[in-house]
Amino acid sequence: MGRSGGRRRDRMRWSKLYTFNCFRGHHGEAGAEGPSSDGAGALRGPGFSRVVHCNNPGLQKPLKYPTNYITTTKYNIITFFPKAIFEQFRRVANLYFLLTAILSLTPVCPFSAVSMIAPLAFVVGLSMLKEGLEDWRRFIQDMKVNNRKVSVHKGDGEFVYRHWEELCVGDVVKVEKGQFFPADLLLLSSSYEDGICYVETMNLDGETNLKVKRSLEATLPLEEDESFKDFQAVIRCEDPNPSLYTFTGNFEYERQVYALDPFQILLRDSKLRNTSFIYGVVIFTGHDSKVMQNSTESPSKRSRIERKMDLIIYILFTVLVLISLISSIGFAVRIKLDLPHWWYLQPQNSNKLDDPSRPALSGIFHLITALILYGYLIPISLYVSIELVKVLQAHFINQDIHMFDEDTGNTAQARTSNLNEELGQVHTVLSDKTGTLTCNQMDFLKCSIAGVSYGVGSSEVEIAAAKQMASGADENDMPLQDIWEENNEDEIELVGVNFSVGNNRKPSIKGFSFEDDRLMQGNWTKEPNSSTLLLFFRILALCHTAIPEINEATGSIAYEAESPDEGAFLVAAREFGFEFFKRTQSSVFVREKHTSSHGTIEREFKILNLLEFNSKRKRMTVILKDEDDQILLFCKGADSIIFDRLAKNGRMYEVDTTRHLNDYGEAGLRTLALSYRVLEESEYSSWNAEFVKAKTSIGPDRELQLERVSDLIERELILVGATAVEDKLQKGVPQCIDRLAQAGLKIWVLTGDKMETAINIGYACSLLRQGMKQICLSIPTGDQVAQDAKKAAKESLLSQIANGSQMVKLEKDPDAAFALVIDGKALAFALEDDMKHMFLNLAIECASVICCRVSPKQKALVTRLVKEGVGQTTLAIGDGANDVGMIQEADIGVGISGVEGMQAVMASDFSISQFRFLERLLVVHGHWCYKRIAQMFPALYQQGPKNLFFDWYRILGWMANGLYSSLAIFFLNLCIFYDQAIRAGGQTADMAAVGTTMFTCIIWAVNMQIALTMSHFTWIQHLFVWGSITTWYLFILAYGMTLRSRDNYQILLEVLGPAPIYWAATLLVTAACNIPYLIHISYQRSCNPLDHHVIQEIKYLKKDVEDQTMWKRERSKARQKTKIGFTARVDAKIKQIKGKLHKKGQSGPSLTIHTVS
């Protein structure tokens, strides 16, 4: 690097803020960092064989650990040709065509071998070219990753930049803020004095909340580049494995052995945040790293239609062999019995192909000839056409302007065309959360303080309900698409309800969409309960672990918060006049501006204790001392947790706050309750002594003791109010989920987030709603010893699944909806062979399924379970490296080109830039690829998953239709031309004339049948139908002029053209072939029409314009009744509003709701 010295450390010990996350144990504690002479050093045996010699790469070479080079490609230069050839000839059709191409090289082939080999080479070559291009893109992406640079210690305290791929196990690296970790590292020290750092693991587990990591105390002095000049240590640890949340190892340094745990491990592809720099030593490289251990090999995928075509090929091949066998037996019999009497054929000079003395051999040769001659029963031209059509369909997807994202400039990409038709048959969608459904941005929208609800803005749910009610339509008659597109007037007035759609509001502030003049500009001081309001704002500004960052150029403050909720609260506090602007190791500083006329006052609050939030506690508490030496406890958390801890005199606002919380929940908002209590000095001193004792205790029950002591102080609380923030989903996510649900698709969410966050997102995107019964599966913590813990966990989970299944079966309300929520620990057991089918059966019965705290490997395993267990097409969609496994495992993988890299896109079959484009990809392009129609509605999509157009009934029906047409063409033409004169001289038709007439009838019959199957005509359809027929006549005209033989010279102009019988036969035979199909489709459209038949007729008669009532009614029928999605939620909200209106009556006070732009 350009300098030899290390950067000056930040004089902060942020670990003091944390009670549970940054604990450092003492000597002898199991699992803590303290040195040990026996237990820690005894890490040996299977599964714990890795030895890392830190800062001494030379000692690593005999161990032969892999390099840090990674590859995600399917092929390389050596394996491409054999593997690609194998993939192509896994198709039964290609294997058959290869066989016929080989046979065409023999003397018994009735025509040129080129006519068989050239089409096969074209189909196989085109497919291999596509495979090669797709894999080349993966290779380019891999090279971009491998060529990233990181600062590495080269010796003598000097660091230089090297490519990631050049890293070795044992190297000491320096990673700076905003950079990704190049390998799995052991954290040695950081820019903070106490060796902690903040890490974002979104690429690993989908979580955007920052994780706190901390180094061993023994390595804290390694704070500058020069300090690594003589650094030597040995790490003995577990072997490479995919577990993201566990790590076991020992660190041998300066004749001491220290135990390691996951708090010291920095995983590859996670990012350093809020920390200037860290030093670390490489433990796992390349494919040994945990993120790569969670990846799976790039699979070869085939569509269900293609797999079914293999079965059809088997059937047709069986028919072909049967026909050829009958033909060859007949040929052998005729050769033996009749050929000796046909003196004009000179049987004495016959060869082995027609030797009457060896009829069996002649029959065998004829069998080969017949297989080739009748081989057009399995037409290779069909496969050529299919490949071309798929390429064109992929082009349509790539060029669709409706899937163009203006923000990023990205378009949709069909990265493989093999699965186009599979898009129209999806049954289950498995989606990541962060970056896929959400923007990871919270907007402060409403709040309840002292029993009064503030905030006149409206959530998307409230806006949609208001517009639907204002439309005057019944909630079952008007699709949500109309709600979002219609009724955009400034005022929507109902009886007793007044909705204002605000298009003229002030410019929005990121994280703050609150509107209510009662609290803004210091007006809160005029409210009756201003003292409670003051407490509310101070809780927002003080109860958090965020760090302020001041922009030196502009003076503005940005907050580096561990969660987006905290960031939204701090922005809200600032807008209310309480700006958090500085944090020291022991204090928090806030600028308070109570009214616009008063100046700003800077206040210091000393932090005494901070009990941070976790998924088990569901609350966060800060104990601090204000400038008057008053000790205050501020607590925020889930309402159920806070309400259970309220004092008798602290429940003054409980009833009103509960009502507001229910309203906020109905509106799709995330809520937290806020409370406080005042502590006496003696009470606090007594509690703190016990708390310090628990915090410094040694043993496995330390965390339980901390929770017990924390619970003692978090009692007798006084309720202040509640917050309501809107989780900002990506644009169009609720609408997309709603329409996919109406199309009959099941939607699962797989996320690395904790259960509470996942549930909140479920509410935000309407996979969950108020009134839905939740079945939560989790593993309870207990006091069992290790050998009993697994058994007890499995028994508990089995009981929970059985109870959940029983609850669903006993439910009598047909409108009742169930949601299944399961965490990663429970999922690990649920995916075992003896339990996975019970779990899947319960999940299938639920309207929505949310899996939280899942690892990338578990995402892939869940996807596999659904794919194999349900037996329907699955689609997985995600945007990060942690989603690659499930994207590759699903029948169809869709990658979102997100901010944090292109790993998901490179592993996907299709890529889009926003989740909302999934709707068009499936219900438009997917359905068109499966069955091209003019107008698209969600219910029509079910024609794909139900396989209405490629089931065995239709396949056998078309086979029967083809058999009938072939018989009609053959025998009708024979009857017509048998003894009829065709020329002016009275000559009858020869084989050339009859054969050409038959082919003419085939061309007309096939094109007329294609025309009958088309849903609509454009110039393209006319061009190909009439162009095909015209091309045939031009061909036989050119054929006759080119081949100047006596029999077929000018056959069209001299023989067939002048003969009326030729044209009459063409008309008669074409009609005979198509009349049965015409009768069939006429009966179907009249008596048993499909959905698209009805819609097509309505559009043709313009009833959608002339009769809007009927059109909306028919459109509502196209929606499948669903228990999830925006529609179901809006229906529930409408029932709630109607109930309010019924109570208030027409003369009651109006309820005003403003929208948020």
Image (cartoon, grey):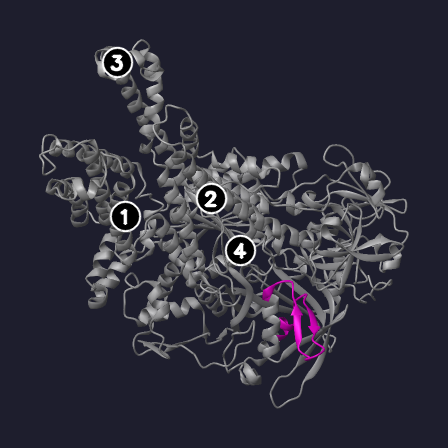
User: Tag 1: residue type?
Assistant: Thr
Q: Mark 4 or mark 1: which is in front?
A: 1
Mark 2 or 3, nearer chain start: 2
Q: CA distance from mark 4 to mark 2?
A: 44 Å
User: Which of the 4 image quadrants contains residue 933?
Assistant: bottom left
Q: Position of residue 1026 (x, y in %)?
A: 24, 51
Closer to the observer: label 4 or label 2? Answer: 2
Cα distance in 3D space between marks 2 and 3:
45 Å
Q: Amino acid at mark 4?
A: Ala
Q: Earlier in the sequence, mark 3 or mark 4?
A: 3
Task: Locate residue 1004, reporting x and y percent.
Answer: 21, 44
Which residue has dot 3 on it?
333
Quick one: 931 or 759, which is closer to the camera? Answer: 931
On the picture, is 156 further left or further right than 962? right
Q: Is residue 273 magenta?
A: no
For residue 622, side relative to residue 510 (left or right)? right
Res. 758 mark: 4
Q: Image check: 648 left or right of 931?
A: right
Q: Mark 1 sits on what residue?
A: 1031
Say whether disc 4 or disc 2 marks the residue closer to the N-terminus: 2
Asked if the stretch drawn in magenta spans residue 544, the answer is: yes
- Cα distance between the residues tagged 2 and 1: 26 Å
Q: Does the residue at mark 3 contact the one at mark 4 (Cβ under 8 Å)?
A: no
Crowd around label 2: few <14 · some 14–19 · many ≥20 (10 Å) = some
Query: Residue at label 2?
Result: 126
Graded by Cα atoms within 10 Å as few (under 14), some (14 to 19) or many (20 or more), the crowding at tag 1 reads: few
Q: What is the distance, in whole Å, between disc 4 and disc 1 at their CAs? A: 61 Å
Q: Quadrant of residue 1061?
A: top left
At label 3, counting other C-alpha atoms closer than 10 Å, the crowd grade (few under 14, some 14-19, many 20 or more) is some
Q: Which residues are magenta?
A: 537-565
- Which residue in the rendered view is the most extreme toward the top? 357
